[in-house]
Image (cartoon, rainbow, N blue to C red):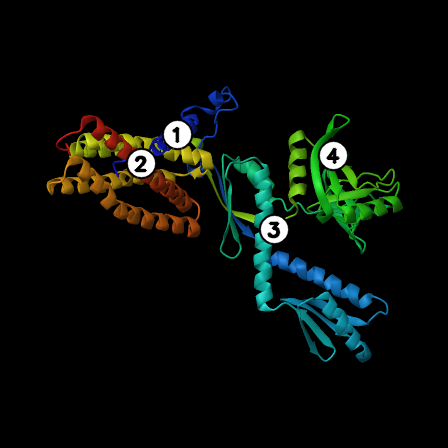
């Protein structure tokens, strides 16, 4: 163990030098890093919500409302299937808790109706009782649909929040119908605005006879009354549009949306997929010189008149947009519509001043811990202890370098993991030094005692650190939020402490031994 090859010494030196370079940006403010050449490392440690400040939102997903909407679509599918030529007479088409029910009028139509209903509800349960049919989901299918709806909502929220440019946002499922959103550095109000919108966009034809409408007037069948987002009548009241219920083109066919400028005004451009482009082109071709309503979450955001067929699948949404509102709308359309309404049931905002206090407290704890460990090691092991303290300081630099390189998020529990690592980092050195003492008492020479100390303590050191690493790995796999932050810093600290104890300290001890060649070790 006292023979160390040159390539190992060079490797240790390069790792330590790289660690110092990677950790160095954390000593500067972001403003100063701007002036540093681009070829130098600039990454700093990501600070979590509790250190940097930001928004913490607990959201409830109205999954049952989404299921109901799905059943209404299923009901419409049954209606369309039974009305296909040759028509099948039916009555009492309605919703039940987990499906739809319908009564077939003529006995001779039952076999044909059964086949059509099977085609509508693929893999659904079809029950028959006389002339009554019930097309429903099984309990297992309902659970799967609820889970899929929530997972789809989380996916869309991830797209929206990540496109805001936030660092390390955390979006996690909690329980059956809740989602936890933690966004360090986010403006809570802006985040709520982006998250809260369903962003379900549809295109409808406007009633050709009436474009603005009294909200108290009776609505004709097949139409619906929707308020304009920003239009007002001469008296300052909102303008209402009477639009046809039939959806000409759905926002599901959108593949891109970007904010842009047209005639000096902010607008939003959009592009359909081939299916949407064909539907959009056919609709505009048939309805030239007619108003066309663009509806977002049951509000008309624009109702332009179709001047000519739009056949390319591209379009422009104009309105009273600001640059910021155009960017927000484009983001919402790009990310897609949420499959379920969301309600914020808990909101916490962490200020940067509280995070700064936590960082100061963490630094103080780390410094005091380092001083206490240094004093103990020097008093207990003399010069060998001083070498261990130097390796410990280098160990902290390597932890900072690893966190910066991996862009792992440092949280308050993560700082606790670093403080814990300070104590554990010298554990390997203590095992080695105590073993060297025992070997020296047994009459071994300094070189033999050091060689035996490192070789015989190696197995114990690996076992101790490996079991702790497994615990950290399990915490990361099954924990969430702060627990993961603690596990990350603990795991990184274990790896760097092993490196510093078994490589850095050993090189220092062996170098000292070769130069001094003492008759007795001062330990």
Report the residue at 49% width, 20% height from top.
Answer: 36
User: Alpha-carbon distance for marks 2 and 4?
Assistant: 66 Å
The residue wearing badge 3 is 341
Callouts 2 and 4 close, C-beta under 8 Å: no
Identify the residue at the far top of this view: 35
Indicate the position of residue 392 as horizontal and vertical percent values.
29, 33
User: Alpha-carbon distance for marks 4 and 3?
Assistant: 25 Å
What is the number of the mark on residue 14? 1
Q: Is residue 81 above or below residue 497?
A: below
Tally of marks: 4
Callouts 1 and 3 close, C-beta under 8 Å: no
What is the number of the mark on residue 503? 2
Location of the N terminus by quadrant is top left
Mark 3, Cα crowd under 10 Å, few <14 / some 14-19 / many 20+, is some
- Between label 4 and label 1, give the one nearer the viewer: 1
First in sequence: mark 2 or mark 4? 4
Report the residue at 64% width, 31% height from top.
Answer: 324
User: Helix or strand or loop: what does disc 1 sit on?
Assistant: helix
Location of the C terminus by quadrant is top left
First in sequence: mark 3 or mark 2? 3
Indicate the position of residue 278 as horizontal and vertical percent values.
82, 47
Mark 2, Cα crowd under 10 Å, few <14 / some 14-19 / many 20+, is some
User: Helix or strand or loop: what does disc 3 sit on?
Assistant: loop
User: Helix or strand or loop: what does disc 2 sit on?
Assistant: helix
What is the number of the mark on residue 507? none
First in sequence: mark 1 or mark 3? 1
Indicate the position of residue 105 as horizontal and vertical percent values.
80, 76
First in sequence: mark 1 or mark 2? 1
First in sequence: mark 4 or mark 1? 1
- Between label 1 and label 3, give the one nearer the viewer: 1
Q: Is residue 264 above or below residue 169?
A: above
First in sequence: mark 4 or mark 3? 4
């Amino acid at each position: 163990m006292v023979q160390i090859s040159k390539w190992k010494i060079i490797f240790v030196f390069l790792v330590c030098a790289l660690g110092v370079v990677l950790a160095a940006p954390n000593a500067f403010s972001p403003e100063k890093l701007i002036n540093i050449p681009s070829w130098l490392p600039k990454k700093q440690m990501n600070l979590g919500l509790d250190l940097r400040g930001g928004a913490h939102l607990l959201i409830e997903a109205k999954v049952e409302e989404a299921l109901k909407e799905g059943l209404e679509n299923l009901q419409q599918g049954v209606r369309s299937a039974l009305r296909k030529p040759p028509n099948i007479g039916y009555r009492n088409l309605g919703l039940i808790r987990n499906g739809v029910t319908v009564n077939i009028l003529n006995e001779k139509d039952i076999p044909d109706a059964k086949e059509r209903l099977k085609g509508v509800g693929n893999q659904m349960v079809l029950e028959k009782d006389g002339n009554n049919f019930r097309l429903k989901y099984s309990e297992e299918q309902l659970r799967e649909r609820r889970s899929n709806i929530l997972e789809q909502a989380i996916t869309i929220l991830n797209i929206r929040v990540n496109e805001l440019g936030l660092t390390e946002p955390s979006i996690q499922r909690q329980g059956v119908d809740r989602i936890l959103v933690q966004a360090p550095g986010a403006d809570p109000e802006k985040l709520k605005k982006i998250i809260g919108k369903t962003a379900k966009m549809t295109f409808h034809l406007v009633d050709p006879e009436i474009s603005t409408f009294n909200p108290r007037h009776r609505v004709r069948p097949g139409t619906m009354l929707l308020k304009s987002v920003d239009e007002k009548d001469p008296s300052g009241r909102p303008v209402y549009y009477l639009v046809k219920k039939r959806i000409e083109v759905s926002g599901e066919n959108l593949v891109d949306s970007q904010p842009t400028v047209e005639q000096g005004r902010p607008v939003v451009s959009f592009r359909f997929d081939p299916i949407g482009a064909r539907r959009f082109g056919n609709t505009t071709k048939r309805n030239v010189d007619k108003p066309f309503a663009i509806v977002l979450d049951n509000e008309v955001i624009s109702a332009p008149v179709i001047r000519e067929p739009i056949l390319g699948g591209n379009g422009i949404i104009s309105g009273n947009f600001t640059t910021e509102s155009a960017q927000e709308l484009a983001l919402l359309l790009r990310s897609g519509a949420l499959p379920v309404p969301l309600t914020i049931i808990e909101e916490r905002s962490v200020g940067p001043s509280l995070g700064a206090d936590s960082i100061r407290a963490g630094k103080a704890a780390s410094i005091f811990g380092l001083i206490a460990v240094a004093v103990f090691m020097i008093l207990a092991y003399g010069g060998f202890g001083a070498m261990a303290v130097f390796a410990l300081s280098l160990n902290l630099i390597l932890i900072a370098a690893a966190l910066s390189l991996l862009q792992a998020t440092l949280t308050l529990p993560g700082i606790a993991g670093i403080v814990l690592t300070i104590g554990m980092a010298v554990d390997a050195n203590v095992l080695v030094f105590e073993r060297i003492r025992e070997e020296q008492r047994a009459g071994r020479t300094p070189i033999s005692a050091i060689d035996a100390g490192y070789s015989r303590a190696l197995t114990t050191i690996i076992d101790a650190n490996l079991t702790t690493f497994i615990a950290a790995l399990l915490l990361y796999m099954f924990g969430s939020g702060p627990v993961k932050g603690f596990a990350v810093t603990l795991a990184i600290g274990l790896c760097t402490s092993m490196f510093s104890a078994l490589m850095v300290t050993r090189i220092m001890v062996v170098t000292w031994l070769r130069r001094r060649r003492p008759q007795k070790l001062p330990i």
